[in-house]
Amino acid sequence: MCAEMLSIVTVQRQSKIPHLQSMLTCLDETALKFARVWIPDPEEVWKSAELLKDYKPGDKVLLLHLEEGKDLEYHLDPKTKELPHLRNPDILVGENDLTALSYLHEPAVLHNLRVRFIDSKLIYTYCGIVLVAINPYEQLPIYGEDIINAYSGQNMGDMDPHIFAVAEEAYKQMARDERNQSIIVSGESGAGKTVSAKYAMRYFATVSGSASEANVEEKVLASNPIMESIGNAKTTRNDNSSRFGKYIEIGFDKRYRIIGANMRTYLLEKSRVVFQAEEERNYHIFYQLCASAKLPEFKMLRLGNADNFNYTKQGGSPVIEGVDDAKEMAHTRQACTLLGISESHQMGIFRILAGILHLGNVGFTSRDADSCTIPPKHEPLCIFCELMGVDYEEMCHWLCHRKLATATETYIKPISKLQATNARDALAKHIYAKLFNWIVDNVNQALHSAVKQHSFIGVLDIYGFETFEINSFEQFCINYANEKLQQQFNMHVFKLEQEEYMKEQIPWTLIDFYDNQPCINLIESKLGILDLLDEECKMPKGTDDTWAQKLYNTHLNKCALFEKPRLSNKAFIIQHFADKVEYQCEGFLEKNKDTVFEEQIKVLKSSKFKMLPELFQDDEKAISPTSATSSGRTPLTRTPAKPTKGRPGQMAKEHKKTVGHQFRNSLHLLMETLNATTPHYVRCIKPNDFKFPFTFDEKRAVQQLRACGVLETIRISAAGFPSRWTYQEFFSRYRVLMKQKDVLSDRKQTCKNVLEKLILDKDKYQFGKTKIFFRAGQVAYLEKLRADKLRAACIRIQKTIRGWLLRKKYLRMRKAAITMQRYVRGYQARCYAKFLRRTKAATIIQKYWRMYVVRRRYKIRRAATIVLQSYLRGFLARNRYRKILREHKAVIIQKRVRGWLARTHYKRSMHAIIYLQCCFRRMMAKRELKKLKIEARSVERYKKLHIGMENKIMQLQRKVDEQNKDYKCLVEKLTNLEGIYNSETEKLRSDLERLQLSEEEAKVATGRVLSLQEEIAKLRKDLEQTRSEKKCIEEHADRYKQETEQLVSNLKEENTLLKQEKEALNHRIVQQAKEMTETMEKKLVEETKQLELDLNDERLRYQNLLNEFSRLEERYDDLKEEMTLMVHVPKPGHKRTDSTHSSNESEYIFSSEIAEMEDIPSRTEEPSEKKVPLDMSLFLKLQKRVTELEQEKQVMQDELDRKEEQVLRSKAKEEERPQIRGAELEYESLKRQELESENKKLKNELNELRKALSEKSAPEVTAPGAPAYRVLMEQLTSVSEELDVRKEEVLILRSQLVSQKEAIQPKDDKNTMTDSTILLEDVQKMKDKGEIAQAYIGLKETNRLLESQLQSQKRSHENEAEALRGEIQSLKEENNRQQQLLAQNLQLPPEARIEASLQHEITRLTNENLDLMEQLEKQDKTVRKLKKQLKVFAKKIGELEVGQMENISPGQIIDEPIRPVNIPRKEKDFQGMLEYKKEDEQKLVKNLILELKPRGVAVNLIPGLPAYILFMCVRHADYLNDDQKVRSLLTSTINSIKKVLKKRGDDFETVSFWLSNTCRFLHCLKQYSGEEGFMKHNTSRQNEHCLTNFDLAEYRQVLSDLAIQIYQQLVRVLENILQPMIVSGMLEHETIQGVSGVKPTGLRKRTSSIADEGTYTLDSILRQLNSFHSVMCQHGMDPELIKQVVKQMFYIIGAITLNNLLLRKDMCSWSKGMQIRYNVSQLEEWLRDKNLMNSGAKETLEPLIQAAQLLQVKKKTDDDAEAICSMCNALTTAQIVKVLNLYTPVNEFEERVSVSFIRTIQMRLRDRKDSPQLLMDAKHIFPVTFPFNPSSLALETIQIPASLGLGFISRV
């Protein structure tokens, strides 16, 4: 048998080698130059290289070029001659599914995982049916509730790989196939198994919810912190390593909601309780207890630091970085409380755990080699006994002794210190294992449900394959379990692979795969390792050595999977599926026996602490094979929900079962459970041993990939046909390889024909029913052909374009050459002509030059002659002149001497006179200077004081004028002096003459002359002195004048500066006022915006609370129905529901005795004893919750009202002015005057009517020619005339007000003082009379009237323009249609052309007839309206006649004929009310609401008819002043609408219909409420119809809340209808065919992007939007409400599309960006067609538009990064980075985004403050508002159709 096993295993192991050419496509087919391959590398495992030379068969060396730039000679293995693995094309790298790779082998898998993990930050990857999860060692934002909602309901292949996708697939298969599911999570310690299992359970809890209000899903999640605290510990590989395996079954009911859970545990590592390796810790719960030791309730435990206890200090690492054990303890206690573990039981658990810690500190003292003792009153033991409630002496005795029982006697034997220590540790482990089982039992009890379980999903979180330096019994059991799981995995993968081939009906052969059954047989078969171990444990003197020898003798050299180490006789080696493992035999027997002294257990059972004996109750019972052993030291525990019972006779036998035997039985049960379910696999990979985030160690990753079965899946896939394409996808992708003649209508046949031409070897592919199957490497070959074809096409395009460019360049060069030649030749010709001209010019120059030289020589000679002549003649003339000049000079000398003598005498006399004048003037000037100095000082003082500056300047000006006058006087004086001087000079001259006469005498008297000369000298001196004094005086006068002018200029400058400062101050004041106004306006705008935002937030909160209230209300109704069904003896009638509600919101729900409870039998007062208490508690709980929600709702409503009042108050403050009261008085007076004038007119009209009626008899009054008829017609025509008169009066009043305003305006500064006083008197008079306020108010009213007229004119003009535009558009369309028809007709033959023209003419005439019919209907309506008006006037006339007939005699009455026309006219004069009887209310509600079909009403009747009918009924009840009737009708209406929506809430037409009618009913209540704010747009007739007796404001609020609920339900219906279409239509469907190609996918096929039957396209979305819009318009929904619905729809479309884009790597490409932008443009075009661009819907698509632009823009340089950051302002940083990480080229010509570019983007966006959330909230609903929209429809004109069945109501 062993020989057969050896041969089988050898074949199987050979088939597993990943390099075999049978498994992969190698270089034999494509061994070309530049082919890229993988070669082994000791450091990087695999290294990429490129062939530098073609490979030829027989070559032993390959010449390769490595990526780092080195050349390498790669030697092939001479034995196997295996060639290196080929690399996949770059387009396939980074795929979501590893099976999508064309070349399937280990390096390709490793490289794909590395690229996804390092470059794209993606931790999940599919490998066929396996999800590979790599631990990032970093918190990622991919597990939020938004991600859960995004994956919910999606196909597994449609979204990027995720643990949520696996969970959704399991949940969906459970519901679809009605088969239980399992999720198997495995991996090394630290790979993330526990976290993955936790997220899977969280997904189920979130998606499914619970079937009751007990929050089972929260309890399931709450079990995680408890199990982690008691079962997880820190190891060298993981800070939170699970030291046990667990299988959690999450139970579901028939509606697939969570009802409970059950947990099984496996292989608890009990040895960790007493021993921890270096840098490791004990279980978390011990450190949590020590960290919380200071709490008051933990004082009794006497705990301290963890370093004080032997069981917690061995690892030397009591603290985990980033973990607070005290907080974790609080979480653990909170989870225990949630699971129903009471405080007393929690304290009991903590007492036992503290006792274990103190037990570890118990020390022993050796007495001799075979005995030991414990010191007396040993404190640790005392604390242990006190906590455990046991006797100290008894426990001390049995810790140092043991009992030996024989057949006849019993002995008590002391034990050694080592044995006692081992017994103490065994006891501690046993207690912990029992406590662990007890906690698991209690958790299962808390998670157990009384409801029958319909199905379950199991989550298996189990340890992966382990191998250490020293491997013991625990590793042996772990690897044994992994062998079993791997076998089950291989069988499942093989089964799925073969089923796929059979389903597609393709020929196949059995795939050879590795079967590890021989290894399992080696462990568990008869005489296997476990069997021999159990046999050795039964031996009295069995040891590990003897057991090892038995193993060698039995299996060595007989089984190929069993080996013996060379240097050890106490170890053995097993060849597992993952690797060889060497196990040390030491300790196997002891751990398998799991021995605990029975006497110690008995001491614990006798404890006074009640909880402790409970832990050991199962020791007294016969336990099942899956339960724990009696000793409790088993490394495997399973806690069933209901333990089985065994016979008493089997007790001893069951107690003797070993740990290995129990583990084997438990493993068999687990495998049976897994085989009965559909498994789903999650393989967790640990990327590095140092816990570095996003660091990938290739060696460690390859080890785990080999061990977890991922490569086995790849091998099985590669052995068959790993690549699979549907025919449509193949055609779409490889259409470029086909010729036009190859394309047939049958896609399948087309693909077959093409493949036969492309791939000659038919074994490389197979044709299935729906798919084409390719062997490994063929897709890469096809991709190469496609790329080559595209490259050839590109080359051809480039060639053509380059040829065209070169031809263009040649033609340009040729043209340029010709032009240059032309210009060169012209230049040469011009040069020659220039040469000829220059030659001729040189000849002429020579001629003229020679002539010039001769002429110049002649002129020189002539000039010399003339010069000689001139010099001679000059000499003669000068001689003559000198003679004459000498004579003349003599005469002049004589004259000068005589004159000097006369002047000397004159100067002497003049000097004396001037000196006298100067002395006098100096004295006067000094006096004047003193005055000026005094005035200058006063000016300086005034200038300093700055008081009365202008007056001072005027005074100074006057002083300057006076000084100017003085100056003029001085000038006059100077002129007089000059005159005197002149007279004196004359006198001196006369004296001089006399002196001349006496000259002769002077000659005689010489002495007298001398004296005269002295006098002359003295006079000269006096004259000079006088001159100098005069000069000084003049200089002083000039200086004074300059100073005065300077002073004046300074004063003027200062005045100018002061004016400038004044102007600047005024400007500054104005500017500050303006800035303050602007600031206040901005602040007011900001505050208004903030108030609006707060109002929207409050409105959103209020509407969310309203939504929650409606949900609780529905839940309350469901519970009420369930309670009625639970009643044993139902009685007829109904019972009023108890309610504590007093608000109006709840009144209409709970106070009605008719609407809700009429059709349901009520419950009895004494329900069933078993079920009613639970239901009643739930009922009371819900009732209390509803009360709280209503109170909260009331508070929110009050706050909302307060906010709205604040907004209104702020707006009112802006508009109010101090003269508001005056405005109201003025308005009232004007109104009173108008009413008086109208009263007078009416009196006059009445008199005219009486006169006209009294003139003729009654029958002729209504005749067309009668005077009364004419009077009526005149009154009808006078209405328009009166309107014109009113307009003229308004204009006159306006002009008067304007003139008054002008009169009030202040006059200019130029006006005189008298005018200003008159104006002030007039103003004072106007103030006294109050005319100013009236004028101001009238002006305001006029302005408002003008504004309203302008607005109305603007609206009318806009409406006219819109109508004209519509007509133009219709004409354009008609023109285009005519042109199309004309073009089509021209293509037709003559006979068909005539027929088509006739058909077109018939269509045109039909349309014209329809238009004419519409016009006729409008005219009929107008005629009916005029007839009604005439009837009204005729009625008035009839009433007047009746009043006059009273005065006529009876005989006259008898003789006069009776007018039959008065009777129907009186009946048809309706008041817009409907009357019904009290008992017909239910019939009214039933026919009008409950049984009404919206489609018939929407098509045949006016919109909102039910709302009008209900309001008219309310009006009649109000008219009767019947409050009970009003209350009953409104309550029944609201409850009936709720019933209809609850019954047909999924029908869009129903919800839209009742939303429209509810809003119309609400508007009617507002319009006819009598409040002025709602009556602005009413007609006088409508104002007469207002409610008179009741204020229904509270019911308006109730109706508003109901409308909000209906709107939210409408949004949910829209979302449910649109959601299946959005992803397919917006993302997957190729609206622009041929732009994006389909990339190869793996095992999990995505939804096809080709528009097959049943798939949604963009047209489907647009059709649905058109349907929604037309239905809402038919129902008469308010336009503003339609805009809000459209905005919400577009938000849903944008959010779902963007969320799917962010979770789908295959959608992030350039071509998909183009598709999205085109689709968005189509949506915008739809908005334009529907005139909804101003609805805000386009803005909701902005994130999607920016994401599409991000896919299309260039992503290389820093400028590109800057452009992206500025462009994507609507996307968050996380979304931008996610899109860039997911960007995937579809073709080889596109480039991936580099990691450095993404980091640049992150650096630029690090300061942006936005939400870290990745996905948009697709469930977000914008707060809805219902703007008041009054109806112009008159209530009295409404007709009730007979189809409604409302014949029992009558019009009033």
Image: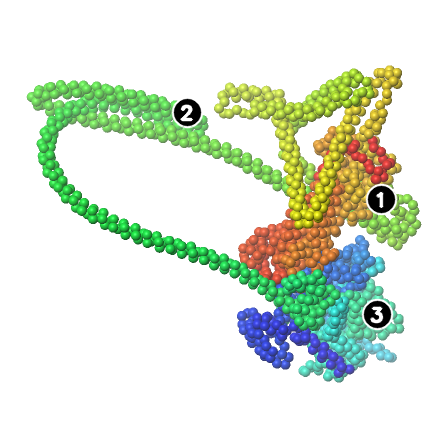
- Image coordinates for residue 1837, horizontal then vertical, percent: 78, 33
The disc placed on residue 1156 is 1
Of the two numbered discs 2 and 3 on the same chain, state the one appearing first in sequence: 3
Apparent side of residue 1835 relative to residue 1043 in the rendered image (left or right): right
**Answer yes or no: do the residues labelled 3 and 1 have beta carbons within 8 Å?**
no
Which residue is labeled 3 in the image? 624
Q: Nearer the viewer, residue 1418 or 1791?
A: 1418
Apparent side of residue 643 relative to residue 590 in the rendered image (left or right): right
Q: Quadrant of residue 413?
A: bottom right
The disc placed on residue 1497 is none
Q: Nearer the viewer, residue 1696 or 338?
A: 1696
Q: Nearer the viewer, residue 296 or 1384?
A: 1384
Question: Dot 1 lies on which element?
Answer: loop
- How many marks are shown on the rendered structure? 3
Q: Amino acid at mark 1?
A: Glu
- Image coordinates for residue 768, horizontal then vertical, percent: 73, 67
**Answer yes or no: do the residues labelled 1 and 2 have beta carbons within 8 Å?**
no
Question: Dot 2 lies on which element?
Answer: helix
Question: Dot 3 lies on which element?
Answer: loop
Per the model, the C-alpha gap separating discs 2 and 3 is 126 Å
Q: Amino acid at mark 2?
A: Met
Q: Residues within 10 Å of mark 3 (few under 14, many from 20)?
A: some
Residue 1555 higher or lower than 1268, as above or below: below
- Image coordinates for residue 94, horizontal then vertical, percent: 64, 64
Per the model, the C-alpha gap separating discs 1 and 2 is 98 Å
Which residue is labeled 2 in the image? 954
Residue 346 higher or lower than 463, as above or below: above
Per the model, the C-alpha gap separating discs 3 and 1 is 55 Å
Q: Amino acid at mark 3?
A: Ser
